Amino acid sequence: MDLILSMHPMARAWLLDGPLSSYVGAFQALLERGRYAEGSSETALRAWSHFAHWMTKCQVSAEQIDDALVEQFLDSHLPRCDCHPAALRTRSGLSASLGHLLALLREQHVIVELPGPSGPIAEELNRYNVHMRDARGLAIGTREDRLVPERRAGVDGVGRRSIRTLRRHRGERR
Ligand SMILES: [Zn+2]
């Protein structure tokens, strides 16, 4: 908590009161687990805080974060960012820290995993997933429940290698 307390009050408010506020405990655990150097932890917190501020401005929720959104922040917002000077603007620091944010949100099942198997079936499932998210706005848990049986059905015709990839993707042994 010390690092959060030592942040600029504005940046701290973006982090603690913004759309990522529910994950502050997980951020701290991640920083401790990764044994980041103090400077890196500070960069990560400031990166997440700037991103959270931008999310608020764009009315984006944590469930909507994906690689494309992070790219939009880095490529479209950052070059013309006029946020408070407390916002971290170092692209390399932002890029690395937002990569960790994506991994954390996937680990916590806030956002969906990247598709494991590749090929036409995986692409089709991915399109279906995007469609479900965009057109129907279903909760992530519901979407995953619906996808799993279809993945099983699709992979049966593809062979053992894809089954192994799928199992690995789903965190199963063998
Ligand atoms: Zn900004």
Image (tube, rainbow, N blue to C red):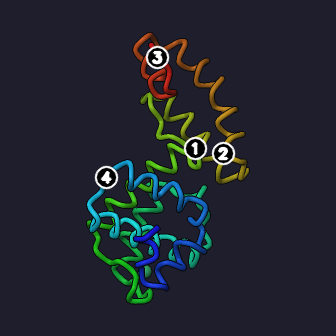
Q: Nearer the viewer, mark 4 or mark 1?
A: 4
Q: Amino acid at mark 4?
A: Arg
Q: Which residue is mark 3?
A: 173
Identify the mark nearer the N-term, 3 or 4.
4
Q: Are marks 3 and 2 in contact (CB under 8 Å)?
A: no
Query: Where 27 falls versus 78 (above or below)?
Result: above
* Cα–Cα gap, marks 3 and 4: 28 Å
Q: Are marks 1 and 2 in contact (CB under 8 Å)?
A: yes
Q: Which mark is residue 109?
A: 1
Is ligand 1 closer than 8 angstroms to the Cβ of mark 4?
Answer: no
27 or 120, which is in the foreground? 27
Q: Residues within 10 Å of mark 2 (few under 14, many from 20)?
A: some
Q: Nearer the viewer, mark 1 or mark 2?
A: 1
- From the top left corner, tell me how far across and down residue 144 is, in percent: 64, 36
Q: Which residue is mark 2?
A: 140
Query: Where 1 falls versus 167 (above or below)?
Result: below
Q: Which mark is residue 124?
A: none
Q: Are marks 3 and 4 in contact (CB under 8 Å)?
A: no
SS assignment at label 3? loop
